[in-house]
Image (cartoon, helix red, strand yellow):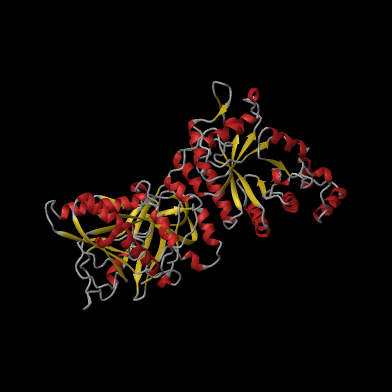
Amino acid sequence: MSNNNVPRVAVGVLYSQEDRDTALSVTSAKETGHDFIILPITHSDYKRFLFDKVEDNKEKRLMEEWRNGKPFLKNDLIIQNNEHVDYLVGKISDWIDLDSSNHQVRTNSEIALNQQFSWAAHLGLTAIFVPTPTNSFLNYARSLNKILGNSTYTHIWMRIPIINEDTPYSNDIEMWEKWNKFRTFCENHHKLSIALELSVNLPDDVYLERWFAEPIKAVILPTKIFLTNVKGYPVLSKKHQGFVKKLMKYKPSFVVFDDMTSKHQDVGFAAYQEYVRHINRTMPEPNQIEQFGNGYQDFLQSPLQPLMDNLESSTYEIFEKDPVKYALYEKAVYYALLDRVALESNEITVIMVVGAGRGPLVTRSIKAAEKANRKVRIYAVEKNPNAFVILQNMKSEVWGDKVTIVFGDMRKWKAPEKADILVSELLGSFGDNELSPECLDGAQKYLKRRTFISPLSSSKLYNEVSAYKDLVHFETPYVVMFQSVTELAKPQEIWQFEHPNGSFVIDEEENPVNNYHNTRYSKVTFNITNSGILHGIAGYFESVLYKDVTMSILPATHSEGMFSWFPIFFPLKVPIYITSNSTLNIYFWRLTSSKKVWYEWCVDASLTVGSETKSYGSSNIQNVGGRSSWIGL
């Protein structure tokens, strides 16, 4: 069944054979239904300018003249003008050898590389396709990094085979390791991306997953990886289909590479791109969370501070669209009422909704009472004067005398009676980052929240934070709908909060004397099986609302269909390469003063060989003293 809501996928073509006529190549690609074509910038015979063998003074003079900036001759170029520039991706010559042991070849290769990039920039090409790094590539990386530093809008697609099929000794992570080292040499530049070339045999899923955290701009599909169906048309294996469908969520371009295997000549070359589009059209409809999060994937958002700031109406409206969250709250109140009061009793249960916002939790509490057939008296407490106007309207038009509305801060409000049931959604993506412990210190009923973390790899998120070019943003946690990420290990619990909390001393107004009982420190140890780059730490929460009524954003127990909270991301200032079979310790603090609460974090990676354990990768302690980010009390 086709999904008409899926955006059209871009499918280009890359030919093995060189065609000197750009117009003819473009026409052929368009006739076979392709959206773009990857073409060499220069002819293969331009290789003569490597001057790998200079036999006389005449050739030496020619070489030096060329080195001094002699322009291209018209016949040296395949892409000669900008007539088809919107349809083209320029391809750098494969014969360029920047790490040759021959000094002359190495020098001339760099000059040729700069020439080709300069011409591509002059024409206005927005993407350049560059060769796969060889086993020795340090000078290649240095040369490309220099070009990246001077590039204004041109992006580089680096051809990276998912498996090195040229050697029988290749392992499943060899090419990722090579790519990772190359991009590290290039300072993780945001304009350096991957053109991932799929192989006939794909690695195991655990190795495929790591590519989802990488900046994949294109996916190359060689014609040799296609099978033939009963009608003679090209199709992909089930494993290839599954991987391609996952990649499509990241919206890369696809490139059909004509590797001259000629397995499907009878049905025509267009059949390959038609099949890719068929896979795209048959993608499953996005679920409710995906629909809600469309456009928010990997987008950095600052966590809300509802105690310090008054939320806008549009913010309330977004959260109120989540039916799952409020259904869980209603269920929790319903079961609490059933357990607390017998059916025949006339006892009135006092429910306090603290941080009532525009009233959805109040409405759900009323519904729970009606369903349970129990008598209740409800207080709705809200400090936001704008939201309180809506509460007044709700009381007048909907709730009537069932609800008493109170304008004020829940922490300072002197309630006329004790609450039997306390209802609040001041959770935040990290469970406690919206100061629910501080707000609920006076809770009269049991509430438990658990916070989890996991080590995260995501060059996308790292580049988003790095773009700000300051320390503050690297020491600020962000709410993010994760997409281009890979967890290096499964989440583990770091701490929990339970209410009521009898561990603190109160003053004459029954408020805590200080906030030290809400500080936390935790060290969590992760065993890293497969190597990867650590860019930061993911945070999640799991909250027990009442008995077995649980609300969670932890991946393993995520409340199905709930989208009110995205995970939280704590960046590392400097990414750390974590080797396979390493131990990673993550240290986390929740700290406080009289005016604010903040988090500090750091990591340490170590490797045990025999009886000796050595640390090889540590970070600074970030956000010391809450210097960059904090939550106001």
Which quadrant does the C terminus fall into? bottom left
x, y percentage for residue 112? Answer: 75, 50
Q: Is residue 164 left or right of residue 543?
A: right
x, y percentage for residue 292? Answer: 45, 50
Dividing the picture into quarters, in which one does residue 544 lie? bottom left
x, y percentage for residue 104? Answer: 75, 51
x, y percentage for residue 399? Answer: 29, 59
Q: Residue at x 66, y 34 (%)?
A: 33
The outermost residue toward the top is 230
Between residues 141 and 610, which one lies in front from this camera angle? 141
The outermost residue toward the left is 344
Between residues 626 and 203, which one lies in front from this camera angle? 626
Q: Is residue 99 left or right of residue 585?
A: right
Q: Residue at x 30, y 56 (%)?
A: 363
366 lies above or below 621:
above
Q: Is residue 152 left or right of residue 431?
A: right
